[in-house]
Image (tube, helix red, strand yellow):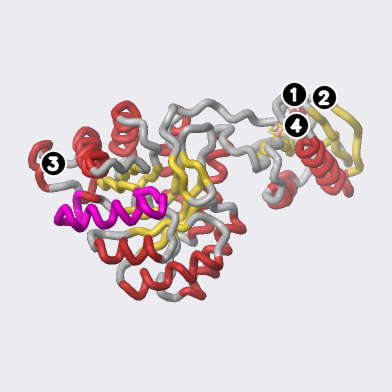
Amino acid sequence: MSKIIHRTKTRPVRVGNLTIGGNDELFVQSMTTTKTHDVEATVKEILRLEEAGVQIIRVACPDERAANALGEIKKQINIPLVVDIHFDYKLALIAIEQGVDKIRINPGNIGRREKVEAVVNAAKAKGIPIRIGVNAGSLERKILEKYGYPTADGMVESALHHIKILEDLDFHDIIVSLKASDVNLAVEAYMKAAAAFDYPLHLGITESGTQFAGTVKSSAGLGTLLSAGIGNTLRVSLSADPVEEVKVGRELLKVFGLSSDAATLISCPTCGRIEIDLISIANEVEEYISNIKAPLKVAVLGCAVNGPGEAREADIGIAGARGEGLLFMKGKTVRKVPEETMVEELKIEIDKLAEEYFEK
Ligand code: SF4
């Protein structure tokens, strides 16, 4: 079963019932696409995302109608609620009053010091963190003039500028993101940020594109960072149903052994040796294990020639043989099963292993 790898050390920050940073866990976040003031539609979408496995949800807050709806939304959902605010400190104050779990606002963009203090004091009083969101596309003019165009150093400098404003007010419950749609730029910025300060990092490749291209782009960027032990929350941004963002995010965590509550499928690409209808079986098993909350590795292989040995790291699997299947565990064949029942038998064995995992 998967083991969580060690992450870069960061300062722990509470967001609702979760601790972001300071440990090995990494959380999947997404953002709603509904009008936030439409409580019913927004809650409906959040519950759908919860079902898909999202752990933190962010909503836009463009106006007072949206801000005033936050308390009601929070009441009806089960995960921490983050609100996204641009510039307007009054909206931030309403959102905090409404009981959100985190606000995303850049203190350097709020304006006069009294306004910044009002937001920081309100966040302190409620014990909620502030996420600083640096975006390569909207760097401060001063920084752009210094570097000529958006650079990783410029992005980190921008983050440090906002961090200093909060630290000077003795506020340290900070999470930082440094998003860019250019993968190399985002990766370099996050790497430099991880070396420059120890606040938890929210990862994202912004405006990454449609479901297919965006998945590839996000996976390339976020994967590089995850493999370096960087990142405490992540969002895969896609021009698609946000459920797809959550699915990709969760899959990425599985790839890097960072998910303690999800099973992974290993399936072969098929070739001329294939003995079973592998593609439909693989899809059926993938669907089945999406509800398994244990970090099991399940393999589905087209034949037994290279099958069980190739999937030695799998906890359990089946390999096709003529008219039957071989059920194997950790690379060793356990028994033969008839082709008609092999998927059902595999499911029963998966359930048993999952139960054993929770009994341990
Ligand atoms: Fe081909 Fe068998 Fe390998 Fe699948 S497991 S790719 S069918 S050799």
Label 4 to label 2, Cα distance in Å?
Answer: 10 Å
Q: Amino acid at mark 3?
A: Ile
The residue identified by callout 1 is 309
Residue located at (70% from left, 30% from top): 1
Q: Amino acid at mark 1?
A: Gly
Residue 308 % position (x, y): 77, 28
Residue located at (41% from left, 62% from top): 59
Residue segment shown in magenta: 108-130
- Mark 4: which secondary structure? loop
Q: Nearer the viewer, mark 3 or mark 2?
A: 3
Q: Which mark is residue 315?
A: 4
Q: Amino acid at mark 4?
A: Asp
Q: Amino acid at mark 2?
A: Lys
- Mark 1: which secondary structure? helix
The residue identified by callout 3 is 143
Residue 13 % position (x, y): 43, 41
In the displayed structure image, the side of residue 33 where residue 251 appears, left or right: right
Above or below — where is 187 with respect to 29?
above
Tell me the crowding category of disc 3: few under 14, some 14 to 19, or many 20 or more residues within 10 angstroms, Cα based.
Answer: some
- Is the CB–ligand 1 distance for label 4 below 8 Å? no
Return the disc, 3 or 2, that comes first in the chain's sequence: 3
Residue 329 % position (x, y): 81, 29
Q: Which mark is residue 332?
A: 2
Is 115 covered by the magenta stretch?
A: yes
